[in-house]
Image: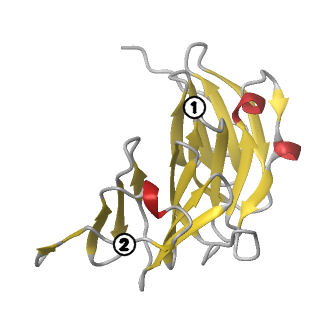
Amino acid sequence: MVRMAVPLVTDSGVRDVFIADDRYAIAATKFGIDVVDLYSMEVISSGTIVDSPRCVAADEFTQRILYIGTEFSGVYTVPLNLIRVRGSDFSSSIEQRFFTGSIPPIDNNQISSLSAGNGRVLISTATSIELITNDVLRSFRLLAPGSSSCILTGVGEAYWNVIGSGVEVNYDIFPTSGTGTIDVDFSYNATSSVP
């Protein structure tokens, strides 16, 4: 195995990586997003935003959108086709999409984790878990200490952690789109597992 170091454009501190189309490593760094072509091992494009990115996820097949979670400004988006243009700076195409003042709003602008697919994005914030469907329908669950990680599966299961508590699960989250509330089907923690 040959290991290569690929110098990044926006910063050297990688916070999160998403692999798109089995070919592109999309790296969230302290100052922006770098896209590495895994075939050529080169940074092919990059973009910067006002706030510091913390996490990235993409809806690769339905909406073809890259979601960028930030420290204090909510979630930004950019079309996936723009980040694959070799030599491009896609900074001007990055748009703030979900934040406390957006429609639909999210509960908190401090984003910890993102997971996307099937026209939906699951968002872990400092105070909630949020499900946005087709950019307009919102469901959420307030969490006292917040959530630092979430996963949305292709079959509609959603998993998220509650900081200092455990993991909560909704086994069929798709029907909750736009209902306002995300229910917990099962909760795993150190002391018990409760449906």
Q: Is mark 2 on a helix, strand or loop?
A: loop
Percent of width and height locating residue 44: 72, 24
Q: Can residue 55 be seen in this view?
A: yes
**Above/below status of 25 relative to 15:** above
Tell me what residue is drawn at x 27 percent, y 77 percent: 165
Front residue (pair 195, 7): 195
Instruction: Give the residue type that dot 1 points to.
Output: Phe
The quarter of the image holding the C terminus is bottom left
The CA span between labels 1 and 2 is 27 Å
Front residue (pair 7, 45): 45
The residue under label 1 is 61
Percent of width and height locating residue 51: 74, 63
Q: In this view, does 106 lie to the left or right of 102?
A: left
Q: Is mark 1 on a helix, strand or loop?
A: loop
Question: Is label 1 or label 2 in front?
Answer: 2
Residue at the far right: name it. 92
**Above/below status of 176 relative to 19:** below
Q: Name which quarter of the figure residue 85 lies in.
A: top right
The residue under label 2 is 183
Tell me what residue is drawn at x 77 percent, y 21 percent: 86
Percent of width and height locating residue 132: 59, 60
